[in-house]
Amino acid sequence: MNDDDGPKRSVDERHTRSVVSPPHLDLDLDVGFTLGLDLPFGETVAFAAEEGFDFVELLLDAAYARERIEDRADTMRATLDQFGRDVIVHLPFAVDPGSPFTPVREGAVTELTRGMDLAAELGAQRVVFHPSSDAWDEGWSTTTTRSFVHDSLDELVPAAHERGLEPCLENVVSSYYDATTFGELLDRYPDASMTFDTSHAVLAGQSETEMAAFLRDHADRVSHLHLVDTRGDADEHLPVGMGRIDFETVLAALAEADWSGTATLEVGTDDYASIALGKNNLEAMLAT
């Protein structure tokens, strides 16, 4: 990764809003993409501005792990400001807030909280994290592991608000709080918001019609989307339009609810053309 956070190309520095709101799907939708772990920060923010993305979503892991970049926060924020882009921070999912081992769980809370500190320094308004547990299912019951997750969220949700951040809990696949059970978590934490991940919902067994029903029922709690396509067997992180998900059915439910929010194209690539393809496909689909 290039440690130089400066811009690599000339762009129009005005914050040009993404146009993805045709009359029949009246969505007030800001669109961003996941900043790939091998992409240089300054160059990628410049690309986001060139392509009309509103923000980048930064995962605090690998090259962008908190301990590796916290001394660059001022420079990174200056780059975002220069190009008029926002940032959403995805806290690391490799830590385990639902660990059955108290020191591990406490360490996860510490790391996620320090990640929130960095998110606030970068100027983020939202943080995404997983309400999950990696506990061995042969040794720990679902009820017990859920209680461990709750122990951590009891600290993490208030910690986000204390830092001026909106905690956007994400539906997962391999832990209890997938898309089919997530309503329980929203009921338990009325001060938390949700990140709805389309690929995770498919892998949890939801059809597009069921996704739409969930979003209609919880539109007031969903603030952020991960628009991720898949062919259905794995969390492939494909650009919109490259898998089998019918995004129009899903997004129509939010339009009916007069919803507004942010959407990340969580594409698992460092190829700029593929990132732009997802945005182009999304706009074309909504405009058809």
Image: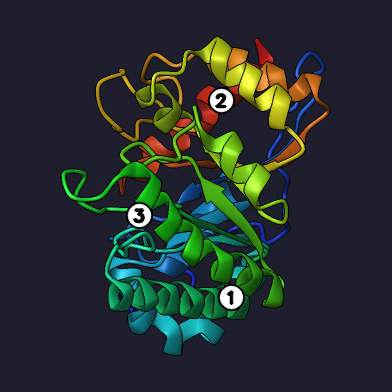
Quadrant the C terminus occupies: top right
Task: Please name the residue that numbered disc 1 is placed on.
Answer: 122
Check whether the beta carbons of the residues at disc 1 and disc 2 lie within 8 A of each other.
Answer: no
Q: Looking at the rendering, in which quadrant would you find the N terminus?
A: bottom left
Chain-order first, disc 1 or disc 3: 3
Q: Is residue 83 visible?
A: yes
Residue 235 location, quadrant: top left
Q: Secondary structure at mark 2?
A: helix
Residue 10 position, x and y percent, is 54, 62
Mark 1: secondary structure: helix
Q: Which residue is mark 3?
A: 36
Q: Quadrant of residue 219?
A: top right
Question: Within 10 Å of the Cα at label 3, are there few (<14), some (14-19), or many (20+) other Cα atoms?
Answer: many
- State the image coordinates of residue 186 (x, y, percent, origin top left): 64, 44
Residue 31 visible (yes or no): no
Could you tell whether 265 is left or right of 164 in the image?
Answer: left
Residue 182's label in the rendered image is: none
Q: CA distance from mark 1 to mark 3?
A: 17 Å
Q: Is residue 243 left or right of residue 288?
A: left
Relative image position of residue 189 (x, y in whole percent): 65, 53
**Neighbours of disc 1 within 10 Å: few (<14), some (14-19), many (20+):** many
Q: Earlier in the sequence, mark 1 or mark 2?
A: 1
